Image: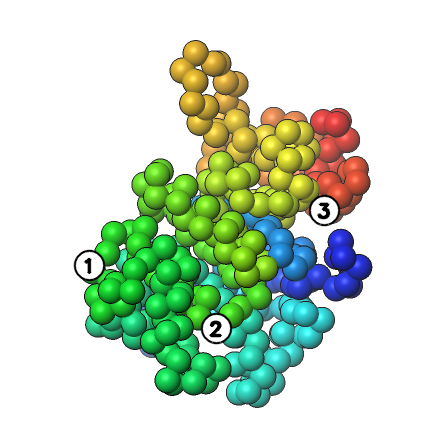
């Protein structure tokens, strides 16, 4: 495994992760397998301790499926996931309840929709204390104290514990979801579009909260988003996905200042600039995103890329290092240096 900057193993290492969903023909009695949705197709990356990796791309590119596959909320088709040097894929495959519970306690998820991820029949106290009952790591007599401490940590008040989810705004609900994830003292949080449904002002509050929690608790994040502005704010490194594959990865500073893949360039050109006088050259991609059931041959981006050649249509480019700590899956990435 690749060593992290502190000379140890990465906290999380994903290698050759694949997740395909079967597609069946319609039928009342018999259904026939007609293909597979290539949601995630052979991706690899790692996350160091205390690091945030941003995972960006268009809707439907496989970002959320990647996060769920890491946590085995969606079972991977193939590939290996190592957490703290332990083979998490093997742990979940064997299914030993104690080891699975321990692995799940260390890896948590904050879901995209704060309106759908909280049980409307449970009070905030019940929602945040439920992990204590499942994992048994907090004595029952300490539950109230711990719940109130978690609510305070995410910017809520103790009296909020007796309320129900419908009594809160979207930003407050997302804070409750974060408190629930923190209840088991995780080391990694997969944050799936945690601010996409929130107002701009509330969005900034949640991002600042995540960064503060990282400093206080030493958390690592896989931050999944299509909002490049928030990714730039919160992530040390950024990986760009297109149609189930990672096409570029580098430090966030490198990605935003000198992208080396045409798809990344198009994404960055779409970021709104808060200056009406400043002219921005938008890169408008032709056509639609190809079907994930039948991805294009060669480079998956070639039908929409103005730089595509016959080589791009025939050979799939490998994700390779173009310069130090900057990888891109493009045959002509060196031309953009």
Residue annotated with mark 3: 319
Residue bearing the label numbered 1? 167
Q: Are marks 2 and 3 in contact (CB under 8 Å)?
A: no
Residue at the far top in the pictured view: 277
Measuring from the top left, give residue 34's x and y in whole percent: 48, 63
Distance of mark 1 from mark 3, alpha carbons? 47 Å
Q: CA distance from mark 1 to mark 2?
A: 25 Å
Q: CA distance from mark 2 to mark 3?
A: 36 Å
279 or 29, which is in the foreground? 279
**Disc 3, SS:** loop
In which quadrant is the N terminus drawn?
Answer: bottom right
Q: Residues within 10 Å of mark 1 (few under 14, many from 20)?
A: few
Using the rendered image of the protein, determine whether residue 247 is visible from the camera's viewpoint. Answer: no
Q: Nearer the viewer, residue 328 or 183?
A: 183
Residue 153 in percent (x, y) is at 41, 59
196 or 155: which is nearer to us? 155
Viewer-nearest of labels 1 and 3? 1
Q: Which quarter of the rendering shows the C terminus? A: top right
Query: Residue 184 got which mark?
Result: 2
If you read the primary sequence from the N terminus, does the residue marked by circle 1 or circle 2 appear first? 1
């Amino acid at each position: 495994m690749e060593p992290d900057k502190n000379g140890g193993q990465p906290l999380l290492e994903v290698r050759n992760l694949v997740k395909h969903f079967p597609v069946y023909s319609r039928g009342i009695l018999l259904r026939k397998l007609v293909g597979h949705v290539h949601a995630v197709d052979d991706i690899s990356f790692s996350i160091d301790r205390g690091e945030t990796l941003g995972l960006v791309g268009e809707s439907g590119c496989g970002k959320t499926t990647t996060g769920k596959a890491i946590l085995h909320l969606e079972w991977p088709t193939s590939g290996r996931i190592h957490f703290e040097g332990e083979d998490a894929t093997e742990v979940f495959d064997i299914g030993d309840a104690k080891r699975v519970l321990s692995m799940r306690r260390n890896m948590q998820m904050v879901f995209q929709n704060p309106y759908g991820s909280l049980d409307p029949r449970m009070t905030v106290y019940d929602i945040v204390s439920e992990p204590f009952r499942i994992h048994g790591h907090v004595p029952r007599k300490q539950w109230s104290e711990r719940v109130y401490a978690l609510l305070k940590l995410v910017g809520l008040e103790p009296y909020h514990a007796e309320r129900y989810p419908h009594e809160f705004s979207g930003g407050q609900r997302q804070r409750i979801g974060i408190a629930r994830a923190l209840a088991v003292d995780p080391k990694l949080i997969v944050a799936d579009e945690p601010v996409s449904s929130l107002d701009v002002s509330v969005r900034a509050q949640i991002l600042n909260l995540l960064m503060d929690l990282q400093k206080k608790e030493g958390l690592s994040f896989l931050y999944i988003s299509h909002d490049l502005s928030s990714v730039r704010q919160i992530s040390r490194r950024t990986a760009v996905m297109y149609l189930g594959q990672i096409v570029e990865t580098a430090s966030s500073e490198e990605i935003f200042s000198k992208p080396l893949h045409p798809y990344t360039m198009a994404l960055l050109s779409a970021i709104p600039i808060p200056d009406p006088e400043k002219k921005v050259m938008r890169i408008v991609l032709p056509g639609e995103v190809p079907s994930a059931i039948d991805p294009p041959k060669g480079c998956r981006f070639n039908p929409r890329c103005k730089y595509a050649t016959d080589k791009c249509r025939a050979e799939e480019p490998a994700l390779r290092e173009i310069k130090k700590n900057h990888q891109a899956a493009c045959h002509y990435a060196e031309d953009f240096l």
